[in-house]
Amino acid sequence: MTDVVLTGLAKQLVLAELLNEKTAQQAYAQARRNKLSLVTYLVQNRLVKSLVLAEMASDQFGVPFLDLNTLDKDGQPKGLVSEKLVRQHHALPLWRRGNKLFVGVSDPTNHQAITDIQFSTGLNTEAILVEDDKLSDAIEKFFDTNSGLGEMADVDLGLEIETVDDSKETTLSGQSDADDAPVVRFVNKMLLDAIRLGSSDLHFEPSVCVFAQTGFCMKSPSHLFIWRVGSPHA
């Protein structure tokens, strides 16, 4: 087999003495066969520690490094970049400042990711180097629709919902106040769904039922409300 001529990141790994030339050549060739980036292959196979690799790459390629543990997850821009594009390029939107979008990548040579995301969003896009294993976990959590629901019991929504006493009866209609309980549960569910999906507005209209977020809509069986982001009604 002809030896692979090392360039770019693979060459820098050898120069930094993180890999010997033969190991780097084998890793490069196997990563291509597996359709993985060299960084992901090295980390998954424990040939180079993720943090060591990221810090070396940041220094050698002049790309700012960020520890994802320090990232403000609530400030991450949602809806700007499709899940398909994020997973295709292993690149995650981190934050936005005006017309500039900062994207986390683990491979400093992954220029195609920045180009494609900039074209898709119309925003100036800048790469931020992050650890590959943390990036993989962050992408999964970013698109996990159930993320955070387990902690919702501890979240104060700032709502004052009067509890219903089933033993009481209304003096106006003669019906039990317990009839309101399903409505309270329904409204609570709508609020939780809104938070889970990261929607900006929750509007109620009769006979219309559409969840709408940037790029897609979802039907709801309730037929009681409309939820729109960036619509003229918002």
Image (spheres, rainbow, N blue to C red):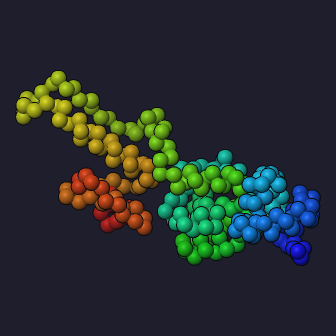
Asked whether the viewer can see residue 16, the reply is no
Q: Give the residue furthest to the top.
A: 167
x and y, in percent, of residue 158 in the image: 38, 38
> Is residue 42 toward the left or the right of residue 69 in the image?
right
Q: Residue, x 35% and y 60% (percent of image)?
A: 218
**Which residue is more in the foreground, 59 or 13?**
13
Q: Residue, x 89% and y 76% (percent of image)?
A: 2
> Is residue 15 toward the left or the right of residue 103 in the image?
right
Q: Residue, x 59% and y 58% (percent of image)?
A: 95
Quadrant showing the C terminus: bottom left
Residue 208, quarter of the rendered image: bottom left
x and y, in percent, of residue 110 in the image: 71, 69
**Which residue is more in the foreground, 29 or 18?**
29
x and y, in percent, of residue 25 in the image: 86, 67
Please say if 29 is above or below 180.
Answer: below
**Which residue is more in the foreground, 26 or 201?**
26
Please say if 195 is above or below 83.
Answer: above
